[in-house]
Amino acid sequence: MTRSVSVVLPTFEEHQTIGGVIEAAREAVADRDYEIVVVDDSETRRTVDALVDRYGTAQTRVRWIRRHDETGLASAVLEGFEIGLGDRYVVLDADGQHPPRRIRNLLYRLDDGADLAVCSRHVDGGEVAGDWPTHRRVISMGAETLAQLAVPTARKLSDPMSGYFAVEADVVDPVRERLRPHGYKILLELVARCPISRIDEVPYTFAEREEGVSGLGPREYLKYVKHLIQLTIPARRESVQVVSPEVEHVDG
């Protein structure tokens, strides 16, 4: 029996891209029992208004809530988990930088026995589209290094900063009340606190942002450092198997 899927999309002023991302995600999970859950923290109503205009208010496959909560993207993801009805959760950004078609590959890895499947820019077949400015590359490398120091399992992950992943609900739900993420990184919280035995990595191309605004800034980076400090003790548990792809068809 195919397990049901909740695709969780945290949004921050993504009214220009949300419709296209939802439709691409729906296509990727069309052969499964699914729902799309949007958790919106935008300062304006434009993202929610775009959803209402496109889907109306009686849509059962696409649901949304508007919080305008300043605690960060990670808490939005957790709220999506809380209201999601699926046996599995898929998380990706709604700004178009995460190609929704790769959801299929993530779910195939769960079908094969992984507890958590993570899209990676750094395994064979993965890449970052365009030319990142030097300061952004330095920040990304620094964040990855800090994650690997604080969370031992992150040393095995090629892309511990990924925000694109799928996870079995039954490894998240029993400990959900103990999850305390800060800022925008939820993956490290799951790796540190959830009873995960196997993580599979899936290559993808991280696209350039075309529309919308980034929610990242100095405040979010400070939250990230505080979060890592809190994770150092719960992260030091038994080893987790991380499986990188040897040969996999890459479609974006």
Image (cartoon, grey):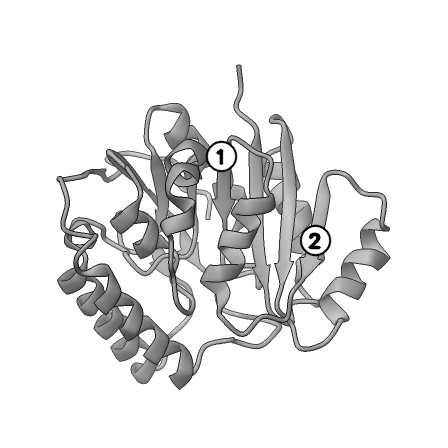
Residue occupied by mark 1: 88
Q: Residue at x 33, y 25 (%)?
A: 113
Q: Residue furthest top?
A: 1
Residue occupied by mark 2: 64
Q: Residue at x 30, y 55 (%)?
A: 188
Give the secondary structure at mark 1. strand
Q: Is residue 126 visible?
A: no
Residue 144, image x, y percentages: 23, 66
Q: Is residue 56 above or below residue 230?
A: above
- Give the amino acid at mark 1: Arg
Residue 179, image x, y percentages: 38, 53
Q: Disc 2 to disc 1, how far (Cα)?
A: 18 Å
**Within 10 angstroms of label 1, few (less than 14), some, or many (20 or more) residues?**
many
Residue 98, image x, y percentages: 49, 55
Quarter of the view holding residue 155: bottom left
Residue 57, image x, y percentages: 85, 50
Tags 2 and 1 in contact by the CB under 8 Å rule? no
